Image (spheres, helix red, strand yellow):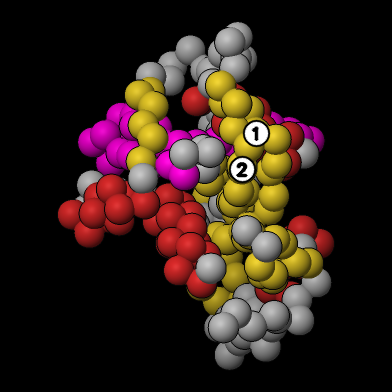
Amino acid sequence: MIMKLSLPEQSVFYGKIYASVSDEEQKEPGNMHKYEERTLKTEEIFNGKILHVQVLEVELPDGKTSKREVIKHPGAVCVLAVTNEHKVVMVEQYRKAAERALIEIPAGKLEPGEDPLEAAKRELEEETGYACAKLEPVTAFYTSPGFADEYIRLYAGTGLEKLSDPKAGDDDEFVDILELGMDEAREMIRSGKICDAKTLVALQHWMLEEALK
């Protein structure tokens, strides 16, 4: 049984109702929580192409002060794309931070001012060569809130069509495209071959919905 939560925005995933945090609520620091940490001073120590690193001096709930190291991220989208043959479209690419190849759902960062839904369509096409007839929001989540503000939106894409002339991806991206059935995906999770967090979230949503049909 899926409970409908009284949050501001709801999203649909294979006909089921899920609650997600609205952009407005997500942007309100702490949302006035009783343990909110008030920022006293901000020092930017790195300003990169994608990431910015800040050291914050904060006031704790007990009045003491502390330092927080925070990575600022523009946000991202990811797509659970399921073919008419009931297979999920994945990409395998080398991730330097992990020093290994990872199997993931298509994903990418938001460009400045870009609509997340349009970003999801763009990433799906650039990384896999697919377009989808239907793209719906599933949920959104923080990836590592202990030190980063990255907020990623998950979409479900159905009615997939392979494009003859898709948009080209980034010049520095090299990927292989995989299409996995549910049993194969489940086994790859169990064996540790799929260990990317956003991909685990997406696949578990997919498996849960299929089990509830």
Give the residues in magenta. 86-114
Q: Is residue 71 magenta?
A: no
Residue positioned 38% across, 19% down in the render: 174
Work out whether residue 199 or residue 30 is closer to the camera in this orientation and state it. Answer: 199
Work out whether residue 57 or residue 12 is closer to the camera in this orientation and state it. Answer: 12
* 206 vs 10: above or below: above
Amino acid under disc 2:
Gly
Residue position marked by numbered label 1 in the rendering: 132
- Give the percent coordinates (x, y) of residue 35: 62, 85
- Give the percent coordinates (x, y) of residue 111: 68, 32
Residue position marked by numbered label 2 in the rendering: 157
* 43 vs 102: above or below: below
* 68 vs 165: above or below: below
Q: Earlier in the sequence, mark 1 or mark 2?
A: 1
Residue positioned 59% across, 37% down in the render: 109
Work out whether residue 170 or residue 133 is closer to the camera in this orientation and state it. Answer: 133
Work out whether residue 141 or residue 87 is closer to the camera in this orientation and state it. Answer: 87
Is residue 108 at all visible to an observer of this figure?
Answer: yes
| Left/right of residue 174 with respect to residue 26 in the rendered view | left
Q: Is residue 97 magenta?
A: yes
Is residue 123 at all visible to an observer of this figure?
Answer: no
- Give the percent coordinates (x, y) of residue 152: 59, 51
| Left/right of residue 6 with respect to residue 51 in the rendered view | right
Q: Are marks 1 and 2 in contact (CB under 8 Å)?
A: yes
Question: Which numbered marker is on residue 81?
Answer: none
